[in-house]
Image: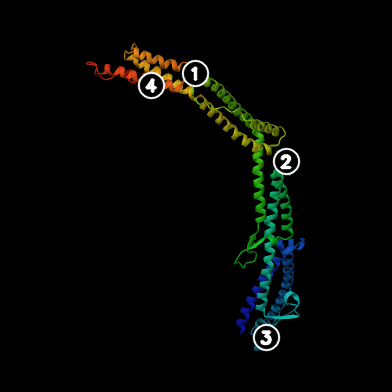
């Protein structure tokens, strides 16, 4: 090496010395390192920190040796402005050759001695610094992210437990109460594990060689948070039941009462139909289901005892069944009264044809009077034979049509039919 090469090498090594010293001091003051030194560690973190702590100790040993070697080279260079051939040879050996001997520099410090060039020593220090910093940064990242989030979730868990107890969601009485106990135990175990072994909750970034590349593993925390959300929704649903339980019970009672009244009306109508209508199939009318009344009584008892978690699903089922019961009662009433509706329709049709006959001036026609009286006796007598009455109405309709036909085609009567003269 000539003088310029020596000066450039010394400048480069001096800059590297300053950079290494700055990095070592920053590592020494890193909050994560101080936490690791004072924590009761376990598992993978304990193993990796023991290795990293030993690496930091070796780093300072290497740095001291590097500083001494660099200072010695600078001293030789500063002897003369124009170094002699012997000085340049010695500087070349010191700056490029394996002239730095470090005792106990082997793996885990068990080697007796090892020789490095200054460039090799810088590379070794960078390697040890990166591995040590990776442990410190990863542990610090986990401690910065997870414990605070776990504490916030634990506070939310406490609020949810208080609300759950107020609505009867307790362990052994409701599945969500048991879930709350499991979440409580999981959060306690998770926090303890994170504090003692943070590196067990670290996911390194694939393909990244930078110290601290990766992210905290929040899988267990996320599962606990989702479980708490599920419980909170269940508790809120139970709370909603508590707030409107009375109104919902009243509504169910009203539906069942209306269904009972409709069935009673259907039974009364069936008696009337059997008395007034002959030769007709009238369906039987069942009574109100006693199971619904028993369930309604159970729901009222749950409300009285504040067993909202039991009341919630029962109310949902009762509302559906009560609406179904009212639909069944209305359908039964419609089926029972169908013959009366048929009779009423026939009566209306008979009166409509009579009015048409009167407008046509045929009210005194003997045949029409006879057939009208026959149909009317059938429709207004009890029991009424609907089939025979329908035939009688049809015969009256046919007679009225035949009686009106000659009149409509009589000479001098061919004119448009006026308002009120159409078929009724």
Q: Quadrant of residue 22?
A: bottom right
Q: Residues within 10 Å of mark 3 (few under 14, many from 20)?
A: some
Report helix, strand or loop for mark 1: loop
Residue under circle 3?
A: 90
Res. 140 visible in picture: yes
Q: Are marks 2 and 3 in contact (CB under 8 Å)?
A: no
Q: Quadrant of residue 349?
A: top left
Q: Quadrant of residue 257?
A: top right
Report helix, strand or loop for mark 2: helix
Marked residue nearer the N-terminal end (1 or 3): 3
Q: Position of residue 307 (x, y in %)?
A: 70, 37
- Picture disc at residue 33: none
Marked residue nearer the N-terminal end (2 or 3): 3
- Mark 4 vs mark 2: give the one in front: 4
- Mark 4 vs mark 3: give the one in front: 4
Q: Report the Cα–Cα distance between label 4 and label 2.
A: 74 Å
Marked residue nearer the N-terminal end (1 or 4): 1
- Picture disc at residue 383: 1
């Amino acid at each position: 090496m000539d003088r310029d090469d020596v000066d450039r090498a010394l400048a480069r090594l001096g800059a590297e010395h300053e950079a290494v010293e700055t990095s070592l001091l920053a590592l020494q003051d890193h909050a994560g390192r101080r936490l690791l030194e004072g924590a009761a560690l376990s598992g993978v973190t304990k193993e990796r920190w023991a290795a990293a702590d030993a690496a930091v100790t070796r780093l300072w040993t290497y740095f001291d040796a590097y500083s001494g070697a660099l200072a010695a080279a600078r001293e030789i260079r500063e002897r003369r402005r124009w170094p002699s051939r012997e000085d340049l040879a010695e500087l070349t050996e010191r700056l490029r050759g394996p002239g730095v001997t470090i005792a106990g520099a082997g793996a885990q410090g068990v080697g007796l001695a090892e020789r490095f060039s200054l460039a090799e020593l810088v590379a070794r220090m960078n390697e040890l610094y990166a591995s040590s910093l990776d442990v410190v940064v990863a542990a610090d990242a986990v401690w910065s992210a997870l414990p605070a989030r776990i504490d916030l979730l634990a506070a939310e868990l406490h609020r949810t437990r208080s609300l759950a107890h107020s609505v009867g969601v307790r362990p052994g009485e409701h599945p969500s109460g048991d879930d709350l106990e499991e979440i409580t135990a999981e959060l306690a175990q998770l926090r303890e594990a994170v504090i003692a072994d943070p590196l067990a909750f670290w996911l390194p970034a694939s393909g990244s060689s930078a110290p601290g590349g990766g992210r905290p593993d929040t899988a267990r925390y996320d599962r606990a948070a989702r479980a708490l959300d599920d419980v909170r929704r269940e508790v809120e649903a139970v709370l909603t039941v508590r707030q409107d339980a009375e109104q919902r019970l009243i509504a169910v009672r009203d539906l069942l009462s209306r269904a009972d009244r409709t069935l009673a009306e259907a039974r009364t109508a069936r008696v009337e139909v059997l008395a007034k209508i002959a030769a007709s199939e009238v369906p039987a009318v069942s009574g109100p289901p006693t199971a619904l009344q028993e369930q309604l009584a159970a729901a009222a008892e749950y409300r009285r005892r504040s067993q909202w978690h039991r009341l919630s699903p029962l109310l949902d089922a009762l509302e559906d069944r009560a609406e179904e019961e009212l639909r069944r009662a209305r359908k039964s009433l419609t089926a029972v009264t169908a013959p009366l509706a048929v009779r009423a329709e026939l009566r209306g049709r008979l009166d409509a044809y009579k009015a048409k006959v009167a407008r046509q001036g045929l009210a005194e026609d003997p045949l029409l009077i006879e057939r009208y009286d026959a149909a009317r006796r059938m429709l207004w007598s009890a029991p009424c034979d609907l089939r025979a009455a329908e035939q009688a109405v049809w015969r009256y309709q046919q007679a009225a049509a035949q009686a009106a036909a000659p009149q409509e085609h009589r000479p001098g009567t061919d004119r448009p039919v006026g308002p009120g003269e159409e078929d009724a």
